[in-house]
Image: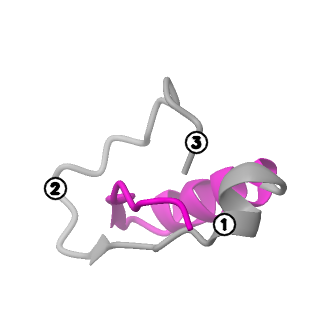
Amino acid sequence: MRFEGREGANTQRSVRRVVPYPDLYTNYVEVERGKATAEALEALGAHVVVPDVPSS
């Protein structure tokens, strides 16, 4: 997701790792939706890893 500089929650002790794959719409149009997804998952205690995916 295109939101570099986002300070993630301290979830280093988390046993859950979540890898949400952003689609083109979320990555370029609804970026705030992607940020909110990551923040919600972190609030639930998951370690969020957003992969670099090529654009289509």
Task: Please name the residue shown 42% across and 42% down the image.
Answer: 9
Q: Residue 16, percent across and down?
A: 25, 76
Crowdedness near tag 1: few (<14), some (14–19) or many (≥20) residues, C-alpha within 10 Å: some
CB contact under 8 Å: marks 3 and 2: no
Please give the label number shown on residue 2.
3
Q: Which amino acid does label 2 sit on?
A: Arg
Was residue 47 drawn as part of the magenta stretch in this picture? yes
Viewer-nearest of labels 2 and 1? Answer: 1
In the rendering, at what x and y percent does residue 56 appear?
56, 68
Please tell me which of labels 2 and 1 falls first in the chain. Answer: 2
Q: Mark 2 points at which residue?
A: 13
- CA gap between label 3 and label 2 equals 25 Å
User: In which quarter of the view is residue 39 placed?
Assistant: bottom right
Q: Quadrant of residue 23?
A: bottom right
Q: Mark 1: which secondary structure?
A: helix
Kind of residue at disc 3: Arg
Residue found at the very far front of the displayed protein = 56
What is the spatial separation of the Cα atoms under label 1 and label 3, in whole angstroms?
Answer: 10 Å
Disc on res. 24: 1
**x, y percentage for residue 30?**
82, 57
Does label 3 or label 2 sit earlier along the sequence? 3
Q: Give the extent of the magenta segment.
A: 31-56
